[in-house]
Image: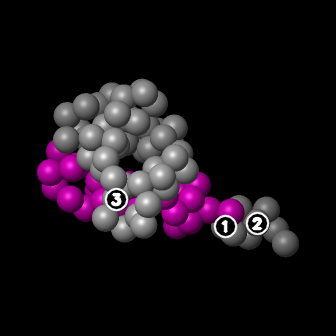
Amino acid sequence: MSNVAETALQTYNGWKNWETWNVNLWVMNEVGLYQLMLSRLPLDIAGCVLLVLEMFPNGTPDMEFSSELKDVDFGELVEAWNEE
């Protein structure tokens, strides 16, 4: 299997995992959440964690358990969101 195929199997829609992708999806598709994220830029990892917990204290509406937030790659979100 090629490196590209192996990487594709280890990611979710180009993101590290479903949890990271899902948080980003909600923030990018809800105007109020998007504007809140923009108002906090630039973000560091600690600020990103606090922001996501403020937005989704019980996980996103798609998450079955709020504990799924522990799997979010906040560094990946910081990198993506700081490019906005």
> Mark 2 sits on what residue?
6
Regarding residue 83, the answer to whether it shows in the image is no
| x and y, in percent, of residue 80 in the image | 43, 44
Of badges 1 and 3, nearer the viewer stands 3
Question: Would residue 10 be found to the left or right of residue 64 on screen?
Answer: right
Quadrant, the C terminus: top left
Q: Vertically, is 78 above or below 15? A: above
Question: Would residue 34 be found to the left or right of residue 49 on screen?
Answer: left
- Residue at image point 25% right, 61% down: 29
> Separation of disc 1 and disc 3 at Cα?
24 Å
Name the residue type under label 2.
Glu
> Mark 1 sits on what residue?
8
Label ID, residue 60: 3
| x and y, in percent, of residue 41 in the image | 29, 31
Helix, strand or loop at disc 3?
Answer: loop
State yes or no: discs 2 and 1 in contact (Cβ < 8 Å): yes
Q: Which residues are magenta?
A: 10-35
